[in-house]
Image (spheres, rainbow, N blue to C red):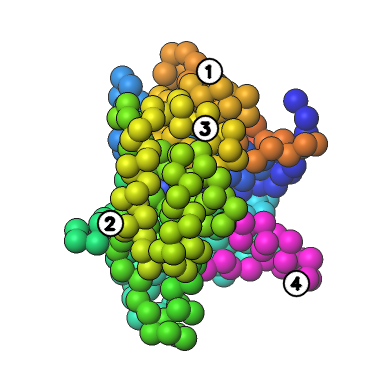
Amino acid sequence: MAALPLEGIRVLDLSNFLAAPMAAMFLADFGAEVVKIERPGGGDEMRLWGNNKNGVGLYYKVINRNKKSVTLDLRTPFGRDAALRLARDADVVLENYRPGTLEKWGLGYDALSAANPGLVLVRVSGFGQTGPKSHRPGFGTLAEAYSGFAHINGEANGPPLLPGFGLADSTTGLMAAFLSMVALKGREANGGRGQVVDLAIYEPLFMLLGPQVINFDQLGLVQQRNGSRLPFTAPRNTYRTRDGRWVSMAGSAQSIFVRVLAALEVPRLVDDPRFADNRARLVNAVALDVELQKAFERFDLDEILQRFDAAGGAVAPVNDVEQFISDPHIQARGNITTVEDAELGGPVRMQNVVGNLSATPGAVRWAGPRLGEHNREILIERLGLDADAVRAAGIELT
């Protein structure tokens, strides 16, 4: 296996659930050593999230892959002291407790940076470390509403819809991983000293919502729910085929729109003044969708895909997970990987590392570990703690 690009970077993951643990996952995927601290006895509550096999949480296996699990109760002097000792050799500490919690435990940035001045502390919370709402508990579900996402998601005559997965948490995980690397690079400009990254869960999703702020600022516009349509390009929607499948299609560029109409054998729409260009199509988006749906339902999915491929039109099937992982393109790209897992008793498939680096690619080396699987390696062999003292603190050694 080629060298991993983040080898030598050490991350202390004090977080739980989804957003910050996902950030640590991205770093671990590219070689950072991530030591995940979990509560003795129960561990990260994500072990109980979602579906399980023989009591083993499956989503935990993905989000905490490539990490080492150590059990410590950070509320105790023993847990605090062990965490500080781990922080001495860490580059990044990730946490997602309510603001003030780490300080209450004696693990705030002052204590961590005293142990290691070069440390970067990434703090993920619902509403950030400052501001009048910073004290409130916050989760991705709240952020999806608070950021404005739910307001624009759904049909025009229906209620606001939350996403069917942890969208705010996931976008925060991506941003936290990025900011971790930015802050590590920033040590060079900061005399080797680390810093604090303060990230609220609603902020990355708000940034991704498009031109809403500038549109409101300059035009007084407030985007409303409009199904799958967008307020800045048309056509853009899902359409049902003759055999009951669905496709997603966009044709904002004029050349693509013309190719779409050729593939669907409705070239007459090119000369329809209602659809002459993107601005005209936006005004008449409902009428355009009616015409396109009539055209799509004349063909089965496979024929649609062949026709669009030949014409150079933009279309994709609406896949479920079974259809996605069986797609030859997905298999050729290596978007799904398989690892062996003792807890689950055999091979496990999951999403592969995101992005292909030509010289130093990342890799999924193991799935999320058993609770406390690395206690002996980290606490005894690395920190040199007394085994009897570790057991006396309620920590199992395997």
Q: Which of the pair 8/170 is nearer the observer?
A: 170
Pointer 1 or 4: first along the chain:
4
Q: Is residue 180 visible?
A: yes
Looking at the image, can residue 364 be seen? no
Spatial CA distance of label 2 from label 4 is 46 Å
Q: Residues within 10 Å of mark 3 (few under 14, many from 20)?
A: some
Quarter of the view holding residue 225: bottom left
Residue at image mark 1: 340
Q: CB of mark 3 within 8 Å of CB of mark 1? A: no
Residue appearing at x 67%, y 56% in the figure: 181
Residue 190 belongs to the span the image colors magenta? yes
Residue underneath mark 3? 307
Disc 3 from disc 1: Cα separation: 41 Å
Disc nearer the start of the sequence (2/4): 2
Q: Secondary structure at mark 3?
A: helix
Q: What percent of the width, then of the height, locates residue 73?
A: 41, 47
**Dominant SS type (magenta):** helix
Amino acid residing under circle 4: Asn
Precedes in sequence: disc 2 or disc 1: 2
| Marks 2 and 3, the one that precedes in the sequence | 2
Asked whether disc 3 touches disc 4, contact meaning CB atoms under 8 Å apart, the reply is no
> For the residue carrying disc 4, how many other residues have a C-alpha within 10 Å: few (<14), some (14-19), or many (20+)?
few
Label 1 sits on what residue type? Answer: Glu
Secondary structure type for disc 2: loop
Of tags 3 and 4, the one toward the viewer is 3
106 left or right of 297?
right
Residue drawn at the location 67% of the way across and 61% of the way down: 182
What span is colored magenta in the figure?
178-198
